[in-house]
Image (cartoon, rainbow, N blue to C red):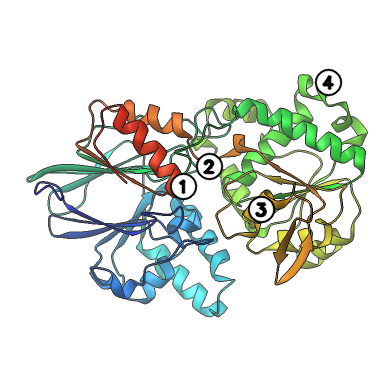
Amino acid sequence: MQDSKIPKITHLGAEYGVTGSCHLLQANGLNILVDCGSVQGGDAARDMATWPVKPSEVDFLFLTHAHIDHIGRIPELVEKGFKGEIITTEATKLLIVPMLEDAMSFTHLRESQIDRLNGVIDELSWGFEYGETFDLKQGVRFKLQNAGHILGSCFVRFESAEPPWSVLFSGDLGAAGRPLLPDPDPPDACDVLILESTYGDTLHQAAGDRVQRLGAVLSQALADRGKVFIPAFALGRVQEILYDMDRLFSNPELKQRFPLLAGKNRIPVFLDSPLGLEITRIYSKLSQYWDRESRSLLHRGDHPIDFDQLYAVARHEDHNKLLEMSGPAVIIAGSGMCTGGRIIDHLKAGIDDPRNDIFFVGYQAEGTPGRDIVRYAAKPGGYVCLDGERFDIRARAHALSGYSAHADQKGLMDWVKSMPRKPARIKIVHGDAPAREALARLLVFSGYRVEF
């Protein structure tokens, strides 16, 4: 039931799924969207024609971060009449255009159309700093705080004095203790909390363990003379993988533990992703948003996401040469769920070779090839369909949750409990049914009023 004091909130995407985040807040005469993302896997997108308001009637679009499942439908929103302001953090503003340009390159749009849309989106976008409260319109104020998910990610709190209300959208919350980025900020109190639940039923492996596992997999690959394929999201995951590789190749203790990775035998690492290269350059320019440890490494002359045997693969002809190269090698490429991009070519060329390994470092949505590889790799006769062709899975597949950019169940609970007081209501979104239900049960047990 809608509280008369609370604005109307309509979930236009990711209410009952993981991708396609889009939420409409109607308050004090304003129509405010929070995120406008594309769907992936088996999630469904709601036609904008069925929205309670037309795109032209949306006054503001707030972006919690620059992942495509949170920004991917912005071009469609603009094409259908949106002329309002796009509000986000300074870092996310710099990431929007390259992320959308890459996403639109796989559509029917011509290059001139992509350039025009990106120009319009850039003109409408405004970047704000963390931790400050700003006036919007009609007595509504907002504050962006660090969500610790990826560079520039935030959660958004809206408030009004008359009538009095406050609503907080968590966006995607990051796991604590990860490299490169600070932990999520503690949230202010609110009347209504819209809370993500991607890993609401999961406890992640400790982040520190993942470097050890990565070192073990790379050592095995070097011994087998095989390749390690890492499907990775260009924004966030690529940079964390590079960070851990840099530690393996430069940290004395890790070099001693994994001697096959040290010295002249060091395995070559190829970043076969033009978007990943561009985003990594942006990350390097925005070191003021890194955590203390990463900034300290940089100041000591050890760039935490760059190392000697890292090779950039930008041109398509170099990508084709890499396909023909024998191992051992590490190849990082998109897309992160194996739904397209250069990783598909690598998997088609090497997934049937038992010397090879596939290293999954992110969530694999239902209905994606990545999910099928994780599910069927260990089963006799396991196969996956890539570009409409069937490929037997003989390469070893590894899923490492320590790389998740999302908080797990404990992280979500700790974050909610850090609020100065309990929200009057929590609405759980952005999760599969088991994750939403498990998190809801735990919150209810802790005395919260929950809808899911």
Packing grade of label 2 (10 A; few <14, some 14-19, many >=20) is some
Residue 179: percent from the left, percent from the top? 58, 31
**CA distance for labels 3 and 1:** 16 Å
Relative to 237, is 24 on the left or the right?
left
Q: Quadrant location of residue 273?
A: bottom right
**Dots 1, 2 in contact, CB < 8 A:** yes
Can the viewer see residue 188? yes
Residue 187: percent from the left, percent from the top? 32, 32
Query: In terms of sequence position, does the residue under pointer 1 or pointer 2 come before the other?
Result: 1
Q: Name the amino acid, label 3.
A: Leu
Q: Nearer the viewer, residue 56 or 281?
A: 56
Q: Secondary structure at mark 4?
A: helix
Packing grade of label 4 (10 A; few <14, some 14-19, many >=20) is few
Q: Name the amino acid, label 4.
A: Gln
Q: Which mark is residue 256?
A: 4
The relative height of residue 73 versus residue 35 in the rendered view (above or below) is below
Packing grade of label 3 (10 A; few <14, some 14-19, many >=20) is some
Residue highlighted by disc 2? 286
In the picture as drawn, the residue positioned furthest to the front comes out as 380
Query: In terms of sequence position, does the residue under pointer 4 or pointer 3 come before the other?
Result: 4
Residue highlighted by disc 1? 91
**CA distance for labels 1 and 2:** 7 Å
**Dots 3, 1 in contact, CB < 8 A:** no
Q: Which mark is residue 277?
A: 3
Q: Name the amino acid, label 1.
A: Ala
Q: Secondary structure at mark 3?
A: helix
Query: In terms of sequence position, does the residue under pointer 4 or pointer 2 come before the other?
Result: 4
